[in-house]
Amino acid sequence: MVLYGSNEGIPSSGSSSPTECAEEMCSYMVTKHSWKGKYKRVFSIGSMSITTYNPGSMEPTNQWMYSDFISILPAAKGQASLPNNEFIITFKKGKKTDSMRFSSEHRASIITEAMRFRHEFGERQAEGQQWFSYKLHWSDQRKSVLLVAGPTGLEQKDPGSNKLLASYFYKDLDGIAEVSDYPGGFVVIKSQFGRMHLFASEGRDEIIKRLQEAAMNHTGLVLRKKDPIKLEKFQTSKFGQFSDDEFITSISEFTVQKLSSRRLEPVRRSLCLTEATLLERDPSTYNIITLKPLGLVAALVRGKENPQMLTIQYTDGENRSYLSTDRDS
């Protein structure tokens, strides 16, 4: 369930000041645990705060501005042998701190979404260790990157600007594996359809160890280390179950200009449709840049102000925006 809008007049456990309006990004059904008993709540993560609602009436019950928020962590941190769906939020209450316990089958997603706003929290959040590394780019070139064992995923940053380029969330990973014939090489494997991303670093063993620790301690997930693979296996199967020719052979292609936060100007791409996937290719080399199964497409959104703009929304939360004179085709 997703809610949008403003929330005026919501009682705040973290602040006595009037609540500001905030756009709500996503919402989850949870169970609140207290000495009075257990209650169903809608746990809503917004751009400025976290709010809970009574699902029966949709009346707000609590709100915590991020400036009063301290942490959100799995309840059984570090205890893989005792799996549960509980998590604890800690927040400021006057001059003291307080906490609340909730549970949800979507615990890892809730923590991941809330931690997107961790830089707004009232207490500074510890950032993970980082390593100078390389990523095997879609152009088959090695690109210099900084890798960070972040609290919710492996973060890929630009080594010059320290700008975040990509996040590989623990909740979306099936595992991690060494590449035995590629010095310092390892792949992160997405759980949806087995997509692999290849990195290389002298600190490979330490990176894997830190990622496993962070996944358990911050999201309550076990990041499994799988059997090593060969470089050839990555090259032939990097798109997982959609690596065969039938999934990368186009039935329609469109020339588009991709909009990206990584670049100041749009970049030319070919958007290719197959029977089962949507591909983004580099028009000069025809190399595949991204592949998404059509089953992950949640919505196609036409730009209200720009008649050439199209945004593709995916079920995993990703959005890709393009400009094209063939938008409505």
Image (cartoon, helix red, strand yellow):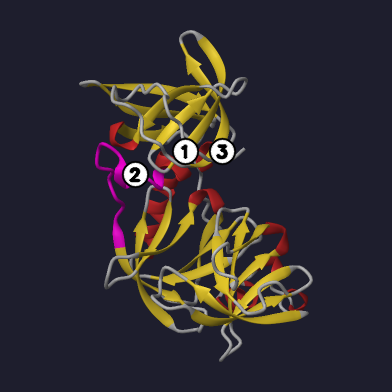
**Image quadrant assignment for residue 235:** bottom right
**Chain part drawn in magenta:** 115-130
In the rendered structure, which amino acid carries the disc numbered 2? Arg
In the rendered structure, which amino acid carries the disc numbered 1? Ile
Cα–Cα span, label 1 and label 2: 12 Å
Mark sitting on residue 3:
3
Q: Nearer the viewer, residue 305 or 98?
A: 305
Residue at the image point whose x is 39% and y is 78% from the top: 143
Q: Quadrant for the N terminus, please.
A: top right
Chain-order first, disc 1 or disc 2: 1
Residue at the image point whose x is 36% and y is 70% from the top: 201
Residue bearing the label numbered 2? 118
Residue bearing the label numbered 1? 45
Chain-order first, disc 3 or disc 1: 3
**Residue 35 placement (x, y as % from top left):** 46, 9
Answer few, some or many: residues within 10 Å of disc 2's Cα (few below 14, many 20 plus, some between 14 and 19). many
Q: Is residue 19 left or right of residue 191?
A: left
Residue 7 lies, with reference to residue 99, above or below; the image says: below
Residue 206 lies, with reference to residue 40, above or below; the image says: below
Answer few, some or many: residues within 10 Å of disc 1's Cα (few below 14, many 20 plus, some between 14 and 19). many
Can I make out residue 76 in this image? no
Front label number (1 vs 2): 1
Q: Quadrant for the C terminus, please.
A: bottom right
Front label number (3 vs 2): 3
Pointer 3 with pointer 1, Cβ within 8 A: no
Q: Nearer the viewer, residue 163 or 259?
A: 259
- Dominant secondary structure of the magenta stretch? loop
**Residue 41 placement (x, y as % from top left):** 55, 24
Say whether residue 120 is magenta: yes
Mark sitting on residue 104:
none
**Residue 319 placement (x, y as % from top left):** 55, 60
